[in-house]
Amino acid sequence: MPKMKTKSSAKKRFRLTASGKVRGNFACKSHFLRRRPQKMKRKARGTMILSAPDARIVKSYLPYA
C-alpha cells in the first residue's frame, strides 16, 4: 500500500495534544485589529482546543498524527 498524504496546510496550523485533542490558533488576529474589542483580542491569545466536529475534519487531514 502507498503511504497516505498529510495535508501540508493542516500540519502547519494544527497539532494534537497528549490526550488526542486538536489544538489550533484563534481566528481574526492578523489585521483590522483596531476595530476589534480589546476583550476579544485578549481572549484570542495563544491557542484553543477545536470543537469535536472540527477536530474530526482536521484529524482526517493528519493521518499519522
Image: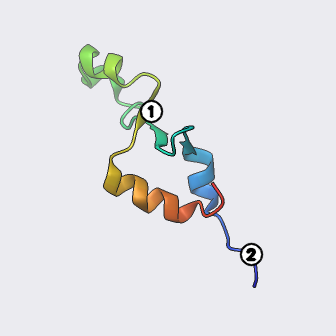
- Residue 65 place in picture, x, y as percent: 63, 54
Left/right placement of residue 62 relative to residue 42 reads right
Q: Which residue is at a point 41% across and 30% down the rendered structure image?
A: 29
Q: Marks 1 and 2, Cα distance to the nearest angstrom?
A: 35 Å
Residue located farthest toward the right when viewing the structure as drawn:
2
Closer to the eye: label 1 or 2: 2
Compared to residue 20, the image places residue 34 above or below, namely above
Q: Secondary structure at mark 1?
A: loop
Residue 47 is marked as: none
Which residue corresponds to mark 2?
Answer: 3
Which residue corresponds to mark 1?
Answer: 30
Residue located farthest toward the bottom when viewing the structure as drawn:
1
Amino acid found under the numbered disc labelled 1: Ser
Compared to residue 19, the image places residue 9 above or below, namely below
- Residue 51 place in picture, x, y as percent: 33, 46
Q: Earlier in the sequence, mark 1 or mark 2?
A: 2
Q: Which residue is at a point 27% across and 22% down the rendered structure image?
A: 40
- Residue 30 place in picture, x, y as percent: 44, 33
